[in-house]
């Protein structure tokens, strides 16, 4: 009986414990959100008369050092980077071994950015800076400013801001020498602060330094500069606008792609390029057209179907002038006339009806082209051959909710090889006016003319207009969506944005973005004021 009572008591106790366990669970407490703390360092931070080769920084908990190659900013830059340990593994200290020869009477700063975190939760010790001087005092002057991108609405991350001695600075300095001082915006800042500076006169340069070597490489880096020296101390705030220079024009040797076509790759601006061809010292007629892929730095060169074992291509553009000889092979394939509709099934009121050809178009016979509406009424139209694009654009009066048929009879289109089209027929439709929106932009504080007004969707240019004297710009029957608006001051009136030129001391043409997205809805008339400040 006693044994049975004991068993009953034991079962009841276990049941009670189980119920209690279900009511709550053991947790690890509140999440750690506190960044690690420094206990001490040897030598102490902000030490003077520094003569050593190693710095040790001790923390109150295990820490990790991550992405140090990108986050650590040393100013002035060292030719031989110090060895920082540990990296990636947990430790309660950081050791910095200096292997470069330090300059005399110079203040050095090591900014660790976001590289130091605690081991468990990854709480960063943000912008920790270790400073020492090889002289008897710490330099304490500061220069502050901000950066912007000349073309994009947001600047790049990890932009370096550099100071050079104005007395020894020349135009070639940024290509050959590292700066006296450097800082970096890291991955989240548009502002910068260069600290622990000596009194003096400096040249200031900003750089998106792709190679992280503090040397300007115009083929890959962006640059921003002030064309005057900055005298320190100063209370001024400086703005540096970064731009990517255009590459100097350079053509590559053409390659044969078919029995009547070459590809020619190039760098730089193709706009003023002249290309000629010859065979056995006799000129060969050619057609130079755009490469079909967007943003491809290549052109297509079509040449006649004639017996040639090679062809000489001469390319000139500004100071560039070069001739290439390309051997020709029988590739058993030639490009031939092939027409396709570029316009989609719905034709917007603002747009032209466009066809595209695989070979260059040399002539149109409009008498063999007919535009009809759904009632078979023949419509008047105009046409324009776009040589470089291998396209033809047609314009006609469009009506709402209409269906149009476009017919090309044989011989309406003739290409570079005197080939003619077969019968072609396409259909397109229009939507109602109410399916589109209208936008009027009222500009004030306009500095100068001409300027370009552009509407973009996620960095894709959709609509543009050029203003020569007007300050109210209309965009009618545009697609309903959220638009980015920007104004380009077209100072050389060439109808496009021009970047800067460092050696010419030329800044990029000014761009001002409207600070918010503009919501254009179907069947809405939107009027937006824009103060150009």
Image (cartoon, rainbow, N blue to C red):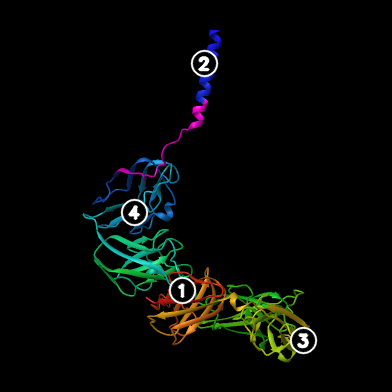
Residue 506 position by quadrant: bottom left
In this view, the mark in front (3 or 2): 2
139 vs 66, left or right, is left
The earlier-in-sequence mark between 3 and 2 is 2
Residue 245: which disc? 1
Residue 184 location in percent, x, y?
38, 60
**Residue depicted at x 25% and y 57%:** 105
Marked residue nearer the N-terminal end (2 or 4) = 2
User: Which label's residue is closer to the chain start, 2 or 1?
Assistant: 2
Image-based side of 263 in relation to 117, left or right: right
Rendered location of residue 530, percent (x, y): 42, 76
Taking depth in this image into account, of 131 and 393 the one nearest to the observer is: 393
- Return the residue at label 2: 9
- Farthest bottom residue in view: 367
Q: Nearer the viewer, residue 497 or 182?
A: 497
- Helix, strand or loop under label 3: loop
Q: What element carries label 1?
A: loop
| Residue 110 - label | 4
Magenta stretch?
18-40
Distance, label 2 to label 4, CA atoms, is: 68 Å
Q: In which quarter of the image is residue 528?
A: bottom left
Q: Is 340 located above or below residue 104 in the figure? A: below
């Amino acid at each position: 009986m006693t044994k049975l009572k004991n068993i009953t008591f034991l079962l009841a106790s276990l049941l009670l414990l189980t119920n209690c366990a279900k009511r709550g669970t053991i947790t690890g407490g509140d999440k750690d959100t506190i960044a690690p703390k420094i206990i001490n360092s040897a030598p102490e931070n902000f030490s003077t008369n520094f003569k050593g080769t190693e710095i040790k920084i001790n923390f109150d908990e295990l820490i990790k050092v991550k992405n140090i190659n990108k986050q650590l900013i040393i100013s002035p830059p060292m030719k031989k980077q110090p060895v920082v340990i540990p990296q990636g593994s947990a430790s309660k200290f950081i050791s910095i071994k200096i292997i470069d020869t330090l300059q005399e009477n110079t203040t050095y700063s090591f900014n660790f950015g976001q590289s130091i975190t605690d081991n468990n939760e990854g709480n960063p010790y943000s912008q920790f800076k270790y400073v020492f001087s090889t002289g008897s005092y710490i330099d304490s002057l500061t220069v502050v400013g901000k950066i912007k991108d000349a073309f994009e609405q947001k600047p790049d991350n990890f932009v370096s801001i550099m100071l050079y001695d104005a007395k020894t600075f020349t135009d070639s300095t940024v290509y050959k020498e590292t700066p006296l001082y450097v800082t970096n915006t890291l991955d989240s800042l548009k502002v910068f602060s260069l600290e622990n500076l000596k009194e003096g006169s400096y040249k200031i340069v900003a750089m998106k330094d792709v190679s992280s070597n503090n040397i300007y490489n115009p083929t890959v880096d962006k640059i921003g500069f002030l064309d005057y020296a900055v005298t320190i101390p100063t209370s001024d705030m400086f703005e540096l606008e970064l731009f990517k220079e255009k590459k100097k024009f350079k053509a590559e040797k053409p390659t044969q792609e078919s029995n009547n076509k070459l590809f020619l790759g190039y760098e730089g601006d193709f706009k003023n390029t002249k290309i000629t061809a010859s065979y056995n010292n006799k000129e060969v007629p050619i057609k130079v057209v755009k490469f079909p892929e967007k943003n491809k730095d290549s052109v297509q060169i079509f040449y006649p179907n004639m017996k040639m074992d090679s062809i000489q291509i001469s390319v000139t553009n500004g100071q560039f002038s070069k001739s290439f000889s390309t051997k020709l092979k029988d590739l058993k394939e030639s490009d031939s006339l092939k027409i396709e509709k570029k316009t989609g099934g719905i034709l917007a009121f603002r747009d032209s009806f466009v066809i595209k050809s695989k070979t260059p178009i040399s002539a149109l016979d409009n008498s063999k082209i007919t535009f009809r509406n759904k009632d078979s009424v023949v419509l008047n139209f105009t046409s324009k051959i776009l040589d470089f694009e291998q396209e033809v654009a047609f314009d006609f009066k469009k009506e709402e909710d209409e269906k149009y048929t476009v017919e090309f009879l044989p011989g309406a289109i003739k290409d570079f090889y005197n080939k003619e089209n077969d019968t072609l027929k396409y259909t397109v439709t229009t939507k109602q006016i109410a399916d589109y929106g209208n936008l009027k932009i009222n500009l004030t504080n306009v500095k100068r003319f001409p300027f370009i007004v552009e509407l973009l969707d996620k960095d894709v240019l959709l609509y543009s207009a050029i203003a020569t004297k007007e300050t109210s710009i209309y965009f009618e029957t545009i697609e309903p969506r959220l638009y980015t608006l920007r104004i380009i001051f077209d100072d050389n009136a060439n109808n496009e944005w021009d970047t800067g030129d460092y050696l010419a001391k030329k800044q990029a043409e000014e761009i001002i973005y409207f600070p918010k997205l503009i919501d254009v809805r179907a069947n809405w008339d939107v009027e937006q004021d824009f103060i150009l400040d």
